[in-house]
């Protein structure tokens, strides 16, 4: 029992050092948010379209590789990533779909008129239910969904050129082959 009194603090200290060491690992990406949805069937969606645009239903994803982007007109990072989202539309075999998240339809329309509309369909998620189904942590968030409706990628932050070229485009190329 006496030894335990001396060993226990050393074991606790060793455990804390191991925990802190893991947090300081240079290979660790502090911005990465793991998703329990990767490799699983996408959530059920049935959203009305924005204005005269087509809405979004699960059946629309079948047989297609889709980049799904949650955005809002009030979101400054969404504006910053918008040109990169527009560039995805030029990739053959890729469908780009948007979901406005808790945004007034008139504000979303103004946003798209100002910056351009890269989406083949836009669903309106006024109550945030679709966002909850996808585990949305905030906007913007981008997902890649394969032909079978399986989520293959999630980016819970704005898309940037290095992630576009280093992660997203290689995955899209792999999926379209």
Image (cartoon, rainbow, N blue to C red):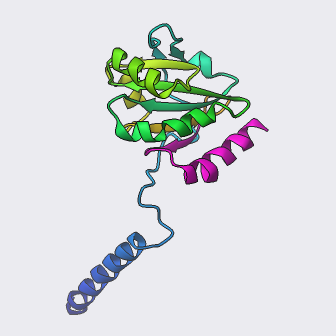
Q: Nearer the viewer, residue 109 or 62?
A: 109
Seen in the image, is 152 located left or right of residue 155?
right
Q: Which quadrant would residue 94 be assigned to in this image?
A: top right
Q: Position of residue 81 (x, y in %)?
A: 48, 40
Q: Position of residue 118 (x, y in %)?
A: 56, 26
Q: Is residue 153 above or below residue 109?
A: below
Q: Give the image location of residue 50, x and y in percent.
A: 44, 13
Identify which residue, 2 or 55, lies in the foreground. Answer: 55
Taking the image as shown, residue 32 lies to the left or right of residue 66, namely: left
Q: Quadrant of residue 150?
A: top right
Q: Which residues are magenta?
A: 151-177
Foreground pick, 88 / 99: 88
Q: Is residue 143 visible?
A: no
Is residue 1 magenta-colored?
no
Q: Residue at x 69, y 48 (%)?
A: 170
Residue 155 located left or right of residue 76: right
Residue 78: image quadrant is top left
């Amino acid at each position: 029992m006496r030894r335990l009194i001396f060993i226990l603090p050393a074991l606790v200290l060793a455990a804390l050092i191991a925990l802190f060491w893991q947090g300081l690992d240079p290979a660790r990406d502090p911005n990465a948010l793991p998703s329990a949805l990767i490799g699983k069937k996408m959530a059920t969606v049935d959203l009305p379209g924005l204005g005269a645009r087509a809405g979004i239903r699960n059946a629309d994803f079948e047989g297609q590789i889709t980049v799904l982007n949650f955005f809002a007109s009030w979101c400054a990072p969404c504006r910053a990533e918008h040109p990169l989202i527009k560039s995805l539309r030029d990739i053959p075999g890729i469908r780009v779909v948007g979901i406005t998240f808790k945004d007034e339809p008139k504000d979303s329309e103004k946003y798209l008129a100002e910056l351009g509309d890269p989406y083949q369909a836009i669903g309106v998620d006024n109550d945030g239910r679709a966002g909850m189904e996808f585990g949305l942590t905030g906007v913007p968030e981008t997902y890649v969904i394969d032909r079978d409706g399986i989520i293959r990628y999630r980016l819970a932050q704005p898309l940037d050129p290095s992630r576009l070229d280093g992660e997203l485009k290689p995955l899209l190329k792999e999926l379209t082959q």
